[in-house]
Amino acid sequence: MSSILDLRNRLRQVLGGALSNPHVRRATFTPAFEERAEDIRIGNTVVRDLELIYRISDVIPQVIDRAYFIDGTLRTVHLMDIECRGIQVPIFLSQIIVGATIRENNELRPYRILNKFIILAPSRALSTANCYGIYLPSNITLDQTGNFYEKIMNNDILFTDISLRFQLRAQSINSVSLSINPEELTGTGKLRSKARNRAKVIMRIMELLLAYEISRQDRRSFIIMDGPIGLLLPYSRLTGVINLEVDEFPSDRYTPQAQRNLYELLSRVIGVVKNVEIIPPDLFPQQGVPFYSFPQVSGLVDPEKEEVDRDDLRSYILAGYVQLRPDLLREVPSIWSSASALIRVDVPLPAILESSLSSNWLTFFKQRVDQTGLPLTQAISNHINSSTYSQQRLSEIVSYIMGEAYPVPSTSPHRMLVELYPIAETEYWIRSKLLSAEELASLI
């Protein structure tokens, strides 16, 4: 990575006139203040209407011969303030790092890393309030217009307006809504929360882009990602290279080539969720590995607040529950719940479908639903139970994940129960690339 001095010079060049504006001042904290967004640690919510798709009775752990492991990390600091009507509106800077390691011939080694710096400011809200707002060139601006692949791959310093949503309104690409209104600029807590959340979303998109890059170069090996696959889908439109539509049933709009492209990516990617918040009521891990329909267990969807179309792409992800290291529970006195050892394995349906369905896997299930009148989840369950290939493939995936139970990573008590060793090593590697909060804050 470039020296701190070079990075400081480039950042000051990007911000340009903003730094000389009389309404802008550098944030001064000693020591520098880091914005934190802690993970949920232990499952605590039972959802009763989950549908069991398939159950694997016996799992024999085995090690994957060749696999990639993707993880992301970030650090966000308060960089400077813009004065608006007598109040100081904070501007933030995030360093986001996403990395992939590869294990081959029993050796885990670094494979590729994306290291980016994101300026986060509520610019539209500031302008609407007739105050000074930061606006930077479109080729480094991450917004609802998308094309993140080209922007992220070609620039190390980027900008995003946290007062604008990434989602589009009805038909117009220019019809966007404010997530922060001008009168809310006094709410510093909300601004901080929006900045942390936006940084996490960008990190997820970067993880998806890295998985996309690997899937194009290696069409045989699994890509194990830290976190839920469902988090990646709603923002895939923004990448400019992947379109995993989740708004409505997709099969009528996708050509055979589009379905094949989705198959090639989703058949490689597996998500491992270590912070399992929502669990089904009939969960008995000692009786095998149960797989459920995805949307209700993802933690993304609250059935009481959001109506879910069961035919969106999240319904094509199977969510399997398993205890990774149950024998360690009694060895970790600070963790006493059996749910603490649970992980969730997110398996996109293409990962267990025959390659002969690669061009029509969406339309295949659409036709099954139309012909039988059964719910999509039942059509998926029926296919798995009738397909030896799908059953073997699903068992292989779970066996691969359980093969990663040892060695145990040296980390917090909860992560000792639920984190894969290669993921932990990937995180250690990318976190070593993070600048300290003081170094980030000193970049202007």
Image (cartoon, rainbow, N blue to C red):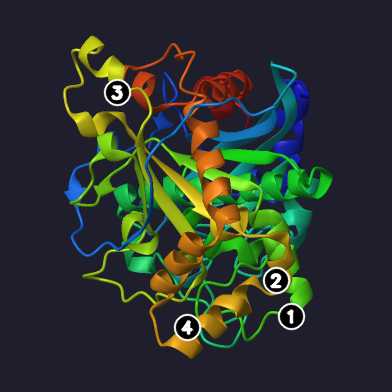
Marks 1 and 2 sit apart, C-alpha to C-alpha, by: 6 Å
Marks 2 and 3 sit apart, C-alpha to C-alpha, by: 39 Å
Is mark 2 in CB contact (under 8 Å) with mark 4? Answer: no
Q: Nearer the viewer, mark 2 or mark 4?
A: 4
Decide which of tag 2 and tag 4 comes sooner along the chain.
2
Rendered residue at 38%/67% (across/down)? 182
Q: Amino acid at mark 3?
A: Pro
Q: Nearer the viewer, mark 1 or mark 3?
A: 3
Where residue 252 sits, quadrant-wise, is bottom right
Decide which of tag 1 and tag 3 comes sooner along the chain.
1
Q: Answer yes or no: is residue 164 visible.
A: no
Rendered residue at 68%/64% (across/down)? 262
Q: Secondary structure at mark 3?
A: helix
Rendered residue at 52%/68% (across/down)? 313
Crowding at label 1, few (<14), some or many (≥20) Cα neighbours within 10 Å? few
Q: Amino acid at mark 2?
A: Gln
Determine whether, in the image, residue 425 is placed left or right of residue 88.
Answer: right
Residue that label 3 marks: 326
Is mark 1 in CB contact (under 8 Å) with mark 2? Answer: yes
Marks 4 and 3 sit apart, C-alpha to C-alpha, by: 39 Å
Q: Amino acid at mark 4?
A: Val
Q: Position of residue 153 (x, y in %)?
A: 78, 47
The one of 32 and 358 positioned closer to us in this rendering: 358
Q: Amino acid at mark 1?
A: Thr
Residue that label 1 marks: 255
Residue that label 2 marks: 259
Residue that label 4 marks: 369
